[in-house]
């Protein structure tokens, strides 16, 4: 089978590997499409995601959909040819946090695409049968790849805790930021500001539902949002970029007793915080770690609101053009929003 391996920062190698064999309780799936995540871009460009460095050669990609090829012993309910979303997180189901329903904090969590577990930028993969979700017939493979990032945003919405008529600011209009904007509007946000330096992504933010899109290179976004709200600030500020000073800008624009939610992953291991701003306002401050029991709802929303999420899907590329596709994405060329890698049979 064909595999795309990251061998160094900004270097991919296409290689051949044996097709794996499913063990008991597992399935063999043929991967058809994989969405590219911001953390994939961190691995590609920075050689790490936060404090998790690459271990080369590394197979990344964790937003996959495909078709079941073979089932292992003991697997029921799945047949060859079934279309499925492939959950990348493998939990133990027995630790303190799994038993409490906080599977994303599992003490023995394995995440396929994070060392040492290879991800999905390959033609075939084995994974536990309970990591499969049936794809609605209405969803094509490209649209279905959004299930994983949308599930992450659904987890973030628990902490955003938006009430109908409240206001929000979203820093970063990459895929996670754009999906956050879409869900905020679905949840009844009265006004959403998007802050994004890339012009094409500001336009995407407006198409996804933002009421205003600010260029932080042209205006001070904190000053502008505070002016727009009569110095009150927004009820919720969400950082989907975690670049530069965006976390502290979220602290600045949030109202007193408001919520600040950090969905993006900073490049650095340590982050400087304007702590006293957070203290004076008595802000609720919530980092987000992946998703937690949100994938089924994500698929339902994708099925029920296709027009709301369609603008995000701007580019696709075959596996053999992965290097140029990632280069385009790193430099935000050609108006790229969400990039999907197609994996031919």
Image: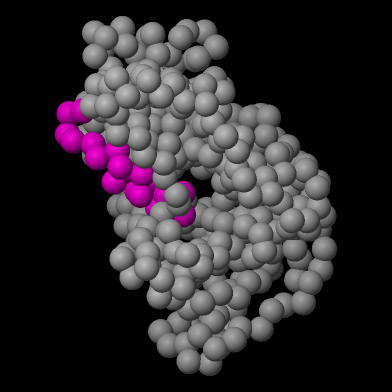
Q: Which residue is outermost to the bottom? A: 73
Q: Nearer the viewer, residue 69 or 37?
A: 37
Q: Is residue 152 magenta?
A: yes
The boundaries of the magenta stretch are 148-169
Q: Which residue is outermost to the left? A: 164
Residue 225: image quadrant is: top left
**Image point (47%, 8%), residue name:** 219
Indicate whether 21 appears above or below 56.
Answer: below
Q: Nearer the viewer, residue 121 or 54?
A: 54
Q: Is residue 187 magenta?
A: no
Query: Residue 204: where, in percent of width, then height?
Result: 46, 29
Indicate whether 307 appears above or below 206.
Answer: below
Quarter of the image that includes the N terminus: bottom right
Indicate whether 330 appears above or below 297.
Answer: above
Query: Residue 167: where, in percent of width, then height?
Result: 25, 25
Query: Residue 292: where, in percent of width, then height?
Result: 37, 58
């Amino acid at each position: 089978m064909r595999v795309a391996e990251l061998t160094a920062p900004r270097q991919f190698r296409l290689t051949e590997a044996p097709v794996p064999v499913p063990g008991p309780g597992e399935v063999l799936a043929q991967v058809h499409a994989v969405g590219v995540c911001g953390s994939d871009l961190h691995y590609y460009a920075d050689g790490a995601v936060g404090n998790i460095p690459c271990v080369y050669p590394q197979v990344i990609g964790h937003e996959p959909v495909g078709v079941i090829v073979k089932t292992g012993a003991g697997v029921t309910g799945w047949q060859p040819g079934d279309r499925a979303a492939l959950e990348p997180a493998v939990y133990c189901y027995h630790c303190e946090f799994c038993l409490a329903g906080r599977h994303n904090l599992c003490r023995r969590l394995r995440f396929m695409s994070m060392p040492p577990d290879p991800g999905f930028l390959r033609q075939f993969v084995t994974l536990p049968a309970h990591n499969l979700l049936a794809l609605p017939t209405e969803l094509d493979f490209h649209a279905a790849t959004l299930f994983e990032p949308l599930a992450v945003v659904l987890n973030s919405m628990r902490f955003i805790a938006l009430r109908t008529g409240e206001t929000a600011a979203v820093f970063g209009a990459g895929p996670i930021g754009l999906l956050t904007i879409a869900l905020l509007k679905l949840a009844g946000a009265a006004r959403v500001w998007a802050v994004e330096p890339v012009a094409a992504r500001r336009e995407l933010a407006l198409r996804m539902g933002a009421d205003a899109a600010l260029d932080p290179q042209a205006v001070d976004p904190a000053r502008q949002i505070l002016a727009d709200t009569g110095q009150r600030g927004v009820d919720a500020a969400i950082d989907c970029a975690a670049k530069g000073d965006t976390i502290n800008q979220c602290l600045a624009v949030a109202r007193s007793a408001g919520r600040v939610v950090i969905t993006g992953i900073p490049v650095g291991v340590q982050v400087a915080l304007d702590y006293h701003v957070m203290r004076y306002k008595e802000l609720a401050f919530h980092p987000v770690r992946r998703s937690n029991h949100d994938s089924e709802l994500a698929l339902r929303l994708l099925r029920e609101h296709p027009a709301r999420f369609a603008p995000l899907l701007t580019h696709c590329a075959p596996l053999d053009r992965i290097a140029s596709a990632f280069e385009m994405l790193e430099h935000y060329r050609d108006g790229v929003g969400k990039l999907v890698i197609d994996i031919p049979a």
